[in-house]
Image (tube, rainbow, N blue to C red):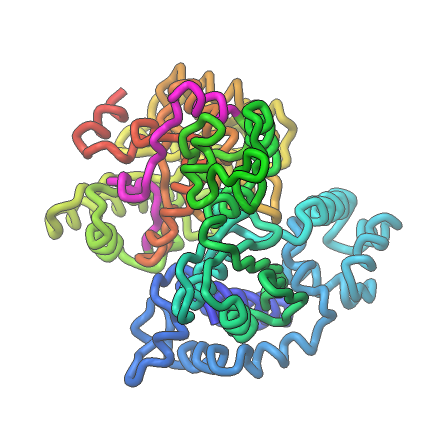
Amino acid sequence: MQNATIAALFEELGDLLELQGANSFRVRAYRNAARTLESVSQSIADVVATPGHDLTSLEGIGKDLAEKIETIVTTGTHPALEEARAQFPPDVRQMLRIPGIGPKKVAALIKELQIQSLADLKAACEQDRVAALKGFGKKTQQIILEGMAHREAAGNRVLLFHAKSAVDEIIRDLRTVPGVDLVSEAGSCRRRRETCGDLDVLATASDSTAVMDRLAAHALVEKVLARGDTKQRVRLESGLELDLRVVPTESYGAALQYFTGSKEHNIVIRRRAQERGLKVNEWGVFRGEEVVAGLTEEDVYASVGLPWIPPELRENRGEIERAEQGTLPTLVEAADIQGDLHMHTTASDGAATILEMAEAAKARGLKYIAITDHSKRVSMANGLDATRLRKHWKEIDKVRGKISGIEILCGIECDILEDATMDLDDDVLSEADWVIAVLHYGLKQPRAQIMQRLLNACRNPHVDIIGHPSGRLIDKRPGADIVYEDLFKAAADHGVMMEINANPERLDLDDIQAAAAKSHGIPIVINTDSHSTDGFNILPWGVYQARRAGLTKADIANTRPFAEFKKLIQR
């Protein structure tokens, strides 16, 4: 069982307990455990299988939670979770994911309107029965309808984080099968799209039966849906479907190119082949009956007059023309990142101290960080007012004297309030080394108000960067209504950077807007927004987003050595 699956079960248990009205500390413990499990790089299942293991060494995991983790790894579930599930309709977890209704409101819907499904909820909204409930009203009803529509539009897709975690585990297992030579992911997961609708895996093997048997028996596979001589389709326990294709070695490159896509990219490749009297398909590149290429992707692209194109760029957004002109970018790598400039400590809603975060960042090879706890507007996260913030910065200064080999900036994640002012006064912000301005509340304000807030933040002489600019949560909450051209122009005019937040649920800026920000000459910063020492592990997801935007090492501000980075913020 993969870490993401265990974490999802803990998250679900926390939701259901909150729905029951359980103690808030108990609910928070499960959610913190889920966050820890998602960010741990080592397989928890492997840890449990190791004699003498100690899960309580993980951040926020006590004896009770450790026992529950072991039960889940061993049985796939836990009696407490099954008991909680039995008390509510099957659709309740989906209801909890709709923006605008938390556990208390879901409980009211079930009790007052006998809501048993998403269909019941939609009908109740359309009949104005939800608006009539105490504590709801027309506005909440409309938010629910919009949230349901947003989720329906997303379809049965899952976050790249969960999709890639699953496919990586399956590929690792398939590579151990005797006779297997090459195995690779393909499809949207290989292109690092932020969500995936299904998964594709290609393999070369002396015995396709052995590979398919291993996949069918994998712990993540719920059911075999179809099986032929060289192709197998399975459904994973997450609901995601996966296609395995066993292809001849001489066709591996052609199949990898073909099944990676995208469809739009491949249409252009096929047209270029036709112009040269060739035919391209998953078996190879052909001139009549003669095989011209197929062993490697490089050979396939060369046959149509192009260099190899990184998978992240294969969306027919100009990559063909750039390849033809020899101007394809050398995309940024995770190893290029030298600093992380967005993280939280126990001063607000983080799980680790300043020193623990600094030591963990240093252990991962980072050269500098910024401690950026929340400002006071985020009261639910124990946000800091001016007095507490200044005291917090003094603590950071003390830590600087206790650790060498890493620079620490005194920062703040400061809310841009609904009235377009900053959550902290300028005299406070002027004392910070690094100021992240963010939208947390009022994301549904009209465009004019959203833009006034963002533009005012860009004009503020103390703001260094706009963090997770849209405020979106992928497939859960749409972002604010932003005129990005105006935002980027203001940011460029005032020397304000833009963030790609690496949280797999945010990835904000998205790839399209990150590319647009680059076109305005705006430095991009890839940050983890870590809330624990394990939070640094999500950095690659932000890098994937930057690669899809075509960003190079030079486009990313925090690839620079600290001395060079400081010059960017001394404006």
| Residue plotted at (41% across, 24% down) | 518
Q: Is residue 269 left or right of residue 519?
A: right
Q: Quadrant of residue 87?
A: bottom right
State whether residue 437 is above or below residue 504: above
How many dots with numbers?
0
> Residue 552 location, x and y as percent?
34, 30
> Residue 323 location, x and y as percent?
43, 25
| Residue plotted at (26% across, 32% down) | 431
State whether residue 273 is above or below residue 246: above
Q: Is residue 58 magenta?
A: no
Q: Quadrant of residue 501?
A: top left
The answer to whether any part of residue 311 appears in the image is: yes
**Nearest the eye: 290 or 367:** 290
Q: Quadrant of the C terminus?
A: top left
- The stretch in magenta equals 318-345
**Nearest the eye: 152 or 547:** 547
**Nearest the eye: 489 or 73:** 73
| Residue plotted at (44% across, 21% down) | 324
State whether residue 288 is above or below residue 453: below
Q: Is residue 337 magenta?
A: yes
The answer to whether any part of residue 505 appears in the image is: no
> Residue 519 location, x and y as percent?
44, 20
State the residue lying farthest toward the right: 127
State the residue lying farthest toward the front: 289
> Residue 298 location, x and y as percent?
41, 37
State the residue lying farthest toward the top: 493
| Residue plotted at (17% across, 50% down) | 399
